[in-house]
Image: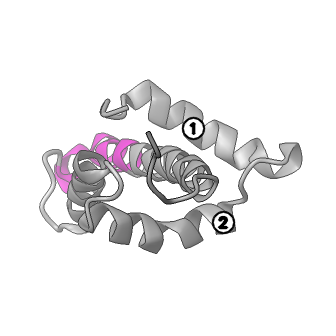
Amino acid sequence: MGKTLKRSAAFSALARALAAGSRGGPSLGARLAALPRMIRATTRGEYDGGLRLALMTAATAYIVSPIDLVPEIPLAIFGLADDAVMVTWLAGSVLAETERFLEWEARRSSVIPGHVAS
């Protein structure tokens, strides 16, 4: 389960999430509402999303940063393409990871805490 998100998985998760409302999957609102819980569970060490959250944080910093690897001014459309790819990857990654987190949360809530008697 500790696999990092691949680019194709992020893009396919974005497509699935956008169509999920009509098929009964988690809504976009439910996924976004899960973000703070996911961050909290990760920082407490309960959820294994540390590396994925770090990658999403780095992508967010890249998007909002005024410094780009491919500048917009001299390269016009190519300068905007790297930002568009990064935004699309980030959206897909957030949707894929929140779906994974919601599944983890559902499995976790079905477990009754206690001790195993031998």
Q: Is residue 84 left or right of residue 102?
A: left
Q: Residue at x 17, y 68 (%)?
A: 66
- Kindly indicate whether the residue at mark 1 contacts the one at mark 2 (C-beta within 8 angstroms): no
Q: Secondary structure at mark 1?
A: helix
Horizontal and vertical percent position of residue 56: 30, 54
Q: Which residues are magenta?
A: 71-86
Q: Which residue appears at 64% of the width and 53% of the height?
A: 110
Report if residue 74 lies within the magenta region: yes
Tag 1: amino acid = Ala
Give the residue number, with chain letter if any, for mark 1: 13
The earlier-in-sequence mark between 2 and 1 is 1
Percent position of residue 82, x then y: 30, 43
Q: For numbered disc 2, what is the local secondary structure?
A: helix
- Report if residue 25 lies within the magenta region: no
Location of residue 42 (image quadrant): bottom left
Q: Position of residue 71 (x, y in %)?
A: 17, 51
Residue located beneath label 2 in the image: 30
Q: Residues within 10 Å of mark 1 (few under 14, many from 20)?
A: many
Quarter of the picture containing the N terminus is top left
Q: Amino acid at mark 2?
A: Ala
Horizontal arrangement in the rendering, residue 68 relative to residue 56 (left or right): left
- Which quadrant of the figure contains the C terminus? top left
**Residue placed at 76% from the left, 46% from the top?**
20
Along the viewing direction, whichever of 63 and 74 lies nearer the viewer: 63
Query: Is 9 placed above or below 29 here?
Result: above
The numbered dot on residue 79 is none
User: Please, is residue 62 above or below residue 29 in the view?
Assistant: above
Q: Is residue 7 left or right of residue 103?
A: left
